[in-house]
Image: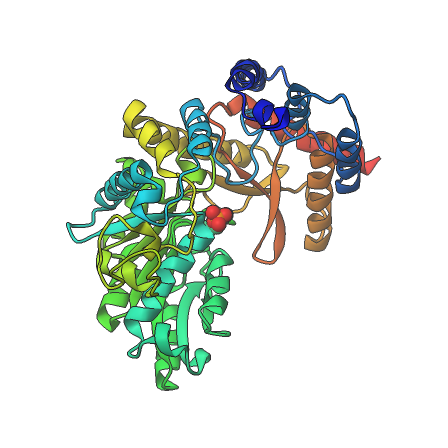
């Protein structure tokens, strides 16, 4: 055997580099937490970043430690309290370490024998999630690589269940005769899933009300319109919560609407589903147990590195119809609904060992950590909203229901168009500066600054600092 191969697989090399890496990452974490690292996002424009890494690639002396150091230096710092941007989880150490073990074992998940432990753990964590949702004994679920795939998986089951011929075998006929109704505020993955399902423009947006919730009267109108046109409404999708403004649809009302009409009820709770663990905030998803399927991302509010999404079904049998495919080289009995050949129920063939990090987090820290984390971040959003309301040069878009807060800088005396431009420029200037990482959104046709309070250590001083920073950038842009 060549020494190239021997060296590459060396356990001693792993030990040496691994110890250094752990020290390096621990220092990174503590510098972020203590704010010694002065930027939440070290910004380079795309061409500069490409050139930077091209130069590194041609550096003959670059070590693994240096690559890691530069990767850390040149990435968004989720663990920095002034990271208040997208809905990406700030992973806890145990889930980060678990990821290394998953990478080491590289266990596939398509059939039991390719991932015995991860299969058993997946059942344990998906059963736990079903129980927390409030589902009964017949429930069950799977883990998928992300919420987009989770939504697709659930809606595939809906299509197979509600359409009265075997779509899987026969293909979809006249796609746009089948309708999925969803709020205009929902995540784009629902429309995308509809296209993949062969519904053409069959995913129809229901207007939202002034609070950004799906308007129930509009839902009814659209349902009546389509059934009047002899189109078949398959499903209604509620958001818990919406991506842009963090608003929860009226779950109980949508549930009743679907039950009365025999429609599949799916909830995209990718971001805000974690409130089922909180007695303080679970009212936001009251009625969630009535849904046929629910998607919750562990890599958003449940402290796990991505991707890992729980897709839960009220009736576990439905989960077998998402992919009603024969694959006799993998399993002997295609029709059998055994729990342990998970590839029958997921789009992934090879799938990462996603369950370990959730198992570890639940076993070591328990639900209590998740509950405390979610409640503290939702509380912090209310605190921030109150601060915005006491500063007359800022305008809150809407009372936050979750940890997403949208607002804009508004000194008055300007048109809405000018305000859009000012807020866009402020956000770009802040991105390039990097002290805070915030994003922007369009709500009601206007530009707003958008924050998602993901970092557990972001506090009132950071919020005050953020408003000051926005003012500074406005001044800088105005001179
Ligand atoms: C409500 C909602 N659903 C689905 C998704 C897509 O999830 P993923 O990025 O895991 O595919 C997002 C992502 O932001 C989301 O906010």
Give the residue at x 47% y 33%.
103
Residue 345, position as x, y percentages in the image: 33, 56
Give the residue at x 23% y 56%.
316
Q: Quadrant of the N terminus?
A: top right
Whether 109 is drawn above or below 380: the answer is below
Residue 340, position as x, y percentages in the image: 26, 48
Q: Is residue 477 left or right of residue 124?
A: right
Give the residue at x 55% y 40%.
86
Give the residue at x 21% y 46%.
134
**Along the line of sight, the residue nearer the viewer: 221 or 109:** 109
Q: Is residue 166 left or right of residue 391?
A: left
Q: Is residue 250 visible?
A: no
Q: Quadrant of the C terminus?
A: top right
How many numbered callouts?
0
**Along the line of sight, the residue nearer the viewer: 9 or 319:** 9
Most extreme residue toward the right, as rendered? 479
Residue 62, position as x, y percentages in the image: 73, 22
When asked about the image quadrant of residue 376, the answer is: top left
Most extreme residue toward the bottom, as rendered? 229
**Along the line of sight, the residue nearer the viewer: 13 or 314:** 13
Q: Is residue 448 visible?
A: yes
Most extreme residue toward the front, as rendered? 1
| Type of colouring | rainbow
Residue 309, position as x, y percentages in the image: 39, 45
When asked about the image quadrant of residue 257, the answer is: bottom left
**Along the line of sight, the residue nearer the viewer: 148 or 386:** 148
């Amino acid at each position: 055997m060549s020494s190239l191969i021997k060296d590459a697989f060396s356990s001693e090399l792993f030990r040496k580099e691994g110890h250094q890496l752990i020290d390096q990452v621990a220092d990174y974490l503590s510098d972020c937490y203590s704010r010694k690292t002065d930027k939440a996002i070290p910004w380079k424009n795309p061409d500069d970043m490409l050139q930077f890494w091209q130069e590194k690639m041609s550096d003959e002396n670059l070590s693994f430690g240096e690559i890691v150091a530069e990767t850390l230096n040149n990435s968004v710092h989720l663990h920095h309290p002034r990271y208040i941007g997208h809905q990406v989880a700030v992973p806890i150490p145990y889930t980060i370490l678990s990821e290394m073990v998953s990478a080491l074992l590289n266990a596939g998940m398509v059939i039991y024998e390719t991932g015995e432990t991860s299969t058993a753990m997946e059942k344990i964590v998906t059963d736990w999630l079903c129980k927390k949702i409030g589902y009964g004994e017949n429930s069950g679920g799977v883990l998928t690589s992300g919420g987009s795939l989770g939504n697709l998986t659930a809606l595939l089951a809906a299509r197979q269940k509600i359409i009265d011929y075997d779509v899987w075998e026969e293909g979809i006929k006249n796609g746009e005769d089948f309708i999925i109704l969803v709020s205009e505020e929902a995540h784009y993955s629902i429309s995308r899933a509809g296209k993949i399902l062969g519904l053409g423009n069959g995913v129809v947006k229901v207007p939202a009300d002034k609070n950004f919730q799906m308007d129930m009267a509009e839902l009814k109108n659209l349902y009546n319109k389509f059934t009047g046109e002899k189109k078949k409404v398959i499903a209604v999708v509620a958001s818990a919560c919406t991506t842009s403004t963090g608003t929860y649809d009226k779950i109980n009302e949508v549930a009743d609407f679907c039950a009365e009409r025999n429609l599949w009820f799916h909830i995209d709770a990718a971001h805000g589903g974690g409130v089922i663990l909180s007695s303080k905030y679970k009212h936001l998803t009251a009625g969630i147990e009535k849904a046929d399927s629910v998607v919750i991302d562990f890599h958003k509010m449940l402290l796990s590195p991505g991707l890992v999404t729980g897709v839960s079904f009220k009736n576990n049998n439905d989960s077998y119809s998402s992919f009603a495919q024969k694959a006799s080289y993998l399993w002997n009995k295609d029709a059998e609904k055994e729990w342990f050949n998970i590839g029958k129920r997921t789009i992934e063939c090879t799938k990462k060992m996603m369950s370990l990090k959730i198992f570890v987090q639940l076993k070591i820290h328990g639900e209590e950590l998740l509950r405390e984390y979610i409640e503290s971040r939702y509380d912090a959003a209310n605190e921030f909203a109150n601060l915005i309301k006491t500063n007359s040069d800022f305008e809150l878009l809407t009372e936050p229901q979750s940890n997403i807060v949208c607002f804009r800088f508004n000194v008055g005396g300007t048109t809405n168009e000018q305000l859009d431009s000012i807020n866009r420029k402020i956000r770009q200037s802040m991105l390039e500066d990097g002290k805070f990482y915030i994003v922007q959104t369009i709500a009601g046709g206007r530009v707003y600054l958008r924050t998602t309070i993901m970092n557990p250590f972001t506090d009132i001083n950071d919020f005050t600092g953020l408003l000051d920073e926005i003012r500074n950038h406005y001044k800088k842009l105005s001179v």
